[in-house]
Amino acid sequence: MKTFYKIAQYAFKLYIFLLVLFVISCGSRNASNGSYRSTTVSYYANKFNGKKTSSGETYRHSKMTGAHKSLSFGTRVEVVNVENDRSVIITVNDRGPLKPSREFDLSQGAFKKIADLNEGVVKVKYRILK
C-alpha cells in the first residue's frame, strides 16, 4: 500500500510539471501582451514569386505575408516602421529569414506599405496579434 501512494505522488508531480510546461509553451508562442519588440526587416526577392512557401502556400509578392523562424503559420503580426510610423498586418506563412539579425522577411507588398523598396532593410517594431 505504501508503494502505491509513492507512485501516485510521483505521477501527480509529473502531471503538474507537464501541465505547467504546456501552459508556458502555449502562452509564450503566440500570445500578445500588447507590447512591441524591435528588429529589422527586409523583403523577398522577385525570384520567389510563384514558389511554394514552407506552409505549402504559393508565395505572391502582392499579399500581406511574411516569414518567421518559429511563429505558427497563420499568426498575424502588426509591423510598424519606426522611422515613419506606417504599419502593416502580415500573416506568417513561411520560415526564415536567414539573417540572424532579422526576425521577419516580408512580402514585397507588405514591405511597400511601410517603406520604399529601395531602402531594402528597415527598423521596425512589431507585436503579435491575437
Image (cartoon, rainbow, N blue to C red):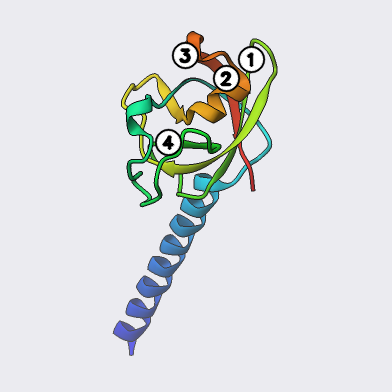
The residue located at (66%, 26%) in the rendering is 87
User: Is 69 above or below relative to 8?
Assistant: above
Label 2, label 3: how many angstroms apart (C-alpha)?
Answer: 10 Å
Q: Could you say which is closer to the camera, residue 6 or residue 63? A: 63
Which mark lies nearer to you, 2 or 3? 3
Query: CA separation, marks 2 and 4?
Result: 15 Å
Q: Which residue type carries mark 1?
A: Val
SS type, badge 4: strand
Among the two numbered marks 3 and 1 on one chain, the one whose residue lies closer to the N terminus: 1
**Dot 1 surroundings within 10 Å: few (below 14), some, or many (20 or more)?**
some
Q: Are marks 2 and 1 in contact (CB under 8 Å)?
A: yes
Discs 2/4, front = 4
Q: Quadrant of residue 81?
A: top right
Q: Which residue is mark 3?
A: 121
- The answer to which image quadrant residue 78 occupies is top right
The residue that disc 1 covers is 82
Kindly identify the amino acid type of the residue bearing the numbered disc 4: Ala
In terms of secondary structure, where does tag 1 sit? loop
Marks 3 and 4, the one that precedes in the sequence: 4
